[in-house]
Image (cartoon, rainbow, N blue to C red):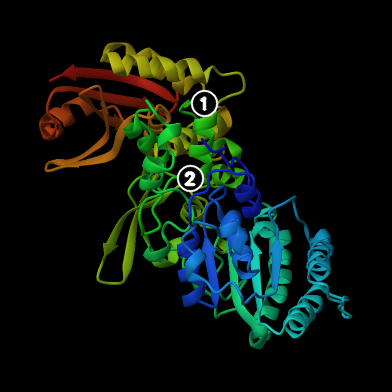
Amino acid sequence: MKKLPVGIQTFRTIIEGDYLYIDKTEIARVLIENYRYVFLSRPRRFGKSLFLDTLKNIFEGKRELFRGLLIEEQWNWEVTCPVIKISFSGGVHSTADLEEDLLHILKSNEERLGLKCENKSKAQYYFAELIKKASEKYQQKVVVLVDEYDKPILDNIENIPEALSIRDGMRDFYTKIKENDEYLRFTFLTGVSKFSKVSLFSGLNNLEDISLNPDYGAICGYTQLDVETAFAPYLEGVDMEKVKRWYNGYNFLGEKVYNPYDILLFIKNQKMFKNYWFETGTPRILIELIKKNNYFIPNFNGLKADDSLVNSFDIEALNLETIMFQTGYLTITRLMDSGMGVGYELGFPNKEVQISFNNSILQSMMASGSQKEPIRHELLNLINAGDVESLEPVIRRLFSSIAYNNFTNNDIERYEGFYASVLYAYFASLGLDIIAEDVSNKGRIDLTLKAEGRALLFEFKVTDTEPLEQIKTMKYYEKYSGERYLIGIVFDPKARNISKFEWEKI
């Protein structure tokens, strides 16, 4: 079997090193033949850099690297183009370093192309001269490839003035692309976030965004067919449905795809189900925005969004849902036609993200030294065993472990949503099948949990009422068959814990 290309983003290294390569060259050919200015947004670790490097080798006419691949007989390898490749994927960038970083990148391209530029006073002028001179020397129009165009901004997203300064500097730089249209054959920018054209791309408003174009839904990532064919020898004896639940599910309006990093690390680590992609880094700003805005965590699954929400990233008015979608923590679960344009339903793409993201939220809420892990394991064991009676003391310990500062400077403890969010995060971090505000023909159930063929229906109150009676009176349980457990919980805002726990089996 071929070696697995874990962490390799260079096309030549994969081909010459005889690593496994999932052929994306036909998608590349169609893209090149149909577009001139292209933008692609995908989450981190999704294969953007490898695809961009594949494009570079195509334009440079490296036919020997494409033997046996789909593009080999469909491309004119006699015609080559000079390529300017700009990558921000390495290191952390700041305003002070940005100009120097750009100058260094441009100098590397100048040397590789054998050029001699005169105006190096500012990166934007250097860039413009580089494009023109490359076209003149090679008597061909130039290809510009930009990898992780937004990384300098995202590196500083928690420092808004710094991020804005970098954004403005990048805008001046990218403007030179449009100004040199007569010298350009093809331009391709990749990144995680999509900034509005009026903020970062005001000088490059001819970019065509293919991020949610169904024809390019699988431009990065592995399809189910890829996993079942190319990876079949590596996955013998593995429960493929479980692999699908854990790592598939990213939807960019084409075929659902796997994050390549997950599949490669899953195989390399003896097929252990772990959070490979998630553990490479969760933006702290996500957790901070959730806590700052007292966000109702169950809303993440089934979130309704319009086109502007998923497509516009604004530094000056950060939108939590937009960041969650563009960074890959939420994906499109359903396309909706509301009569007012396209709409989307968003949710966690798979079990890895559901478990890991909710676990991160819990970690941010727990008091220092609290024993979160034993509580999670106890909860899971009790739920799988159907031991509802023993849930009360565990849930009490759970709320006792929440850090005091989650309650300060607000009256969050008076809202049922806070307690529902905490329990939802716990259950979601266990990988269980949960439905928040579950709709029946009689009303809404606060939380439904399904495990081992049984349904647990929760009703929460922060006043001294009878939540269990409400479930029974409204007969919420009738939509489920099998074992059904009705659980009513009343929270005491002063004690910040349970004041009443009642349950009944139907």
Between 27 and 166, the one lying in front of the other is 27
Q: What residue type is labelled 2?
A: Asn
Helix, strand or loop at label 2? It is loop
Q: Which mark's residue is nearer the viewer, 2 or 1?
A: 2
Residue 333 drawn above or below residue 262: below
In the image, residue 321 sits, relative to residue 29, either above or below, namely above
Residue appearing at x 65%, y 53% in the figure: 12
Q: What element carries label 1?
A: loop
Q: Residue at x 65, y 69 (%)?
A: 60
Callout 2 crowding tier (Cα within 10 Å): few <14, some 14–19, many ≥20:
many
How far apart in space, not on screen, are marks 2 and 1 (Cα)? Answer: 33 Å
Quarter holding the C terminus is: top left
Q: Residue 354 location, x and y as percent?
A: 42, 37
Q: Which residue in the protein does label 1 denote? A: 402
Q: Nearer the viewer, residue 304 or 195?
A: 195
Q: Where is residue 13 in the image (x, y as percent from the top left)?
A: 66, 49
> Which of the marked residues, 2 or 1, is nearer the chain's N terminus?
2
Q: In which quarter of the image is residue 2?
A: top right
